Structure formats: C-alpha cells, structure tokens
Image (cartoon, rainbow, N blue to C red):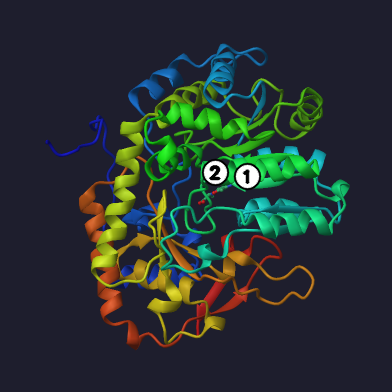
Amino acid sequence: ELPWAEPYKVKMVEEIYQSTREQREKWIEEEGNNLFNLASDRVFIDLLTDSGTGAMSDRQWAEIMMGDESYAGSQSYLKLREVVRNTLGFPYFLPTHQGRAAENVLFSILVKENNVVPGNSHFDTTKGHIEFRKAHAIDCTIDEAFDINNLHPFKGNIDLAKLEEVYKAHPKENIPFCMITVTCNSSGGQPVSMENIKAVKALSDRYGIPVFFDAARFAENAYFIKEREAAYADKTIKEIVKEMFAYGDGFTMSAKKDGLVNIGGLLGMRNEQLYRACGNMGIIYEGFITYGGLAGRDLAALAQGLLESTELPYLKARIDQVEYLGNKLIEYGIPIQKPIGGHAVFVDALNFLTEVPREEYPAQTLAIELYKESGVRGVEIGTLLADRDPETRQDRFPKLELLRLAIPRRTYSYKHLDYVAAALKNIFDRRKDIKSGLEIVWESEILRHFTILLKKK
Ligand code: F0G
C-alpha cells in the first residue's frame, strides 16, 4: 500500500518573518503581554486561530473574479443558496459578515432577558451574545470532556440528563433553543456524535424546544463521525453532513472555518416566519438579505469552499496535520487534551506550568513564553477568555486552562509543525523554573481577552 499525501499542491507562497528572542521580549512587553496586539510581521508561525486564516483554492479565487456584485439577487447569492439547500439542507438562509453576526441576528429575535440557552460549552461570542441580553448560557457538556486524559471519542457530546434537568427547571417559554456546537471549540475541538445529536433532538422535541447548531466546524465534526461511529464508516461526508443538519431547526455558522473563506457567516433555518423576522434584523445590522455584509465575490468563494470542505481527502489532510502536531507533543511528554481535536491542539497549562498559581493565568503565561521562545503565536483558552462572572465580577476559573494551537487550513507545512513542537519542548524542559505568571493592568467588561493589558507578576 502507498503512503497517503495531500490532495493539492501549492500555487502561491507568502513570506513569513523570523525574529530574535530579544526583539520578541521587547515587543510583547510593549503590547501588554497580549498576543492579539502583535503586528503579524512580528509572528513567525501564527496559530492564534484557524478562523479566516486558511488558504483558498484556485477555484475559490476564480469564484472571487466571477463574483456578481448586484445589490439584490446576485448570481453569487443564488449559487450559495444552491449549496445551502443541497449540501446543508436548509430552505432558508441569510448571509452575514461572520459567525457572531449570525448569532446577533438570530438572538435579537429569539433570546430575551432571563432566558436560558443550554448547550455544549458555548463559544465565547455565543455566550457573550446571550449574556449581553441578560440571559444565561448553561453548559451541559458531558463530564468526560473536562478530563483531558479521558479518551471518549465524542467529548463534545451533550449530557442528556443535564439537558433534561434544564428543560424541567425552566418553563418552555424561557428556553428559546438548545445550541449544539460542532465541533465543540471550547471543550477542545471535540466532536459530537450523530447518536448524541439525534438524542438531543428527540429530547428537545419532547419538550418543544428547537435545536440550533453552531456549525463553524461542521465538516470536521462529520469527519469524526465517519471515523469513530461505526454506522457511518461507509457514508460520504456529504451524506453525514446532510443527516447531521436534518436534526436541526437552524444553524449559525462562522464560514471562516469550514467555509474555507477569509470572511463570512451564515444563518440557516427551516421556519419561514423566523426567516422573515431575522431578515429584518439582518437588514438593520448586516445589509440586504441577499448579501448580508459580504461582497458578491465573498458569497461565491463561500459556495465553492463549502463544496471543498465536505470532501474526504481534504478533511483527511486537514485533521492529519492537527494529529501530527498533537502526537509530537505527546511524544515529548507534554500534557494535551486527548483525543486530539479537529482544528487545534490544546495544551494543558495547569499540568505544564505547575508552579504558576491559577490566579496568575498559567495558560496566558505559557502562550507568552511560547511566543518569546519561538515567534509562535497561540491563544489562551482559560480564565481570561472565561471573563468575570457578570454578577459577582470575580474571575471564573474554568475546569480547563488551555493554550490553543489552532492550525489554519491548507497553510503550514509539517516542518512548521515540527518547529512548533520543538519550541514547546524547550519550554517544557525548563518548566520548573517558571514560577510566576501575569497580573491584569486593564480589562474591558466583556470579551476582555481581546484587549486586555497584563504585566509580569
Ligand atoms: N462559534 C464558534 C464555535 C467559533 O469558534 C467562533 C469563532 C464563532 C462561533 C464566532 O465566529 O469569529 O466568525 O464571528 N471562533 C474563532 C476562533 C474566533 O478563534 O476560534 P466569528
């Protein structure tokens, strides 16, 4: 048997820049120890996010050239509508400028003060949009997700007992919907099984609660279903995607992930009335219903991207890179979330920087160390991201304190990943010498991690 290889070759390259440790120490100090503040030419390998950072294909670039920029009824919109209907299976949709815009439009219609929105570890913008409306996001993820060494194949799953408790504790009118995030970013890029999706839908139907997907990484979730759920081994990715979405009343999507575009989002639904209501809200915030904050060319590139990301050879190459980096770190003894997720490797900062107190933000401390060591930019998924409790204003310490190394799609080589692993190993070898972390100098009230300023403790 022959070895496996990527189903594409490179047609264009972009230069990236090396720097010295001295330069990086100075730069990050100046920027308040916040990696979001760094200019990109001060970063060598950028694993801040897999959102909007991937490489488009030649066919997507061709679609960019053919984009129809008509204000209403653009041909590019119609092309995207075909894909939303045929590949995702939703009759109604609105384009939005990105994922959180879809959340904003949908939640403006459905989420009211004191509502509760159960789900599996809502993403921070999702939670932000819920709490901004004085409603509550309730995390019903299975407990296995919070034990990084538990090899449960679907650590994004929703605990049905926890979900039913929520359904029993609140009147139906206070629960606008249940949100299933596929894959579950906040629990480590972990997939949700088809069995679980089906069961959540059945339970929610019994209580009359709609089910919405946060579908940013829907294709990667479908890949894991194919790999790990026996009944789906022989199904195509497109068949699995169609079935997954069949259990949803709608979805929000950041198209910057599995849409394979640099900007864009989608809001899909089955209910015509909801579509009309959201359409009005979309017009206020995003633009007319056939472009929603995007150029015609963006819609066209997205239509093509959705077709490409739901092909098995692409997904295999994608997930293999993430597994490759994860396995290297495991080989070095570095504690990471297992099984390795779909879009990123999550390093367990609490078990890495064991000497740094929880109150001094170990994951952010590790992210800063990695940048200084190598010019690699990751991101904290921990206490800073978790924001303060809206009522007590105290830091809320999440169960996991992680450094996320997100891999952009079709962008870096395996050599780049070797470099990242070697840099982390260097820090791991001297981890006991790192005894203090960071303290906050300034922070915003909500989504503080983007703009926070920190100093060395
Ligand atoms: N939902 C999930 C699961 C996400 O991961 C994101 C974004 C969003 C919604 C919001 O979408 O950025 O297009 O407005 N995640 C990025 C990340 C930012 O780095 O994980 P957006």
Classify residue 317 by image quadrant: top left
Residue 339 location (% of width, % of height): 39, 58
- Residue 136 visible (yes or no): no
Q: Amino acid at mark 2?
A: Glu
Which residue is at 69% across, 33% downward?
249
Task: Answer whether residue 288 is visible to the viewer in this image.
Answer: yes
Kindly identify which residue carries mark 1.
199
Residue at position x 69%, y 62% from top? 446
Q: Which quarter of the rendering shows the N terminus?
A: top left
Position of 304 with respect to 416 (left or right) is right
Residue contact between numbered discs 1 and 2, judged by CB atoms under 8 Å: yes
In this rendering, the answer to whether 137 lies above or below 101 is below
161 and 178: which one is in front? 161
Secondary structure category for the residue under label 1:
helix
Q: Which residue is tagged 2?
A: 195
Task: Give the side of residue 57 with respect to residue 177, left or right.
Answer: left
Secondary structure found at label 2: helix
- Outermost left residue: 1
Residue 177 placement: quadrant: top right
Nearer to the camera, 339 or 167? 167
Kind of residue at badge 1 = Ala
Residue at position x 59%, y 38% from top? 253
**Rendering coords of residue 179 (x, y %):** 67, 46
Q: Is the residue marked 2 within 8 Å of ligand 1, measured from its CB?
A: no
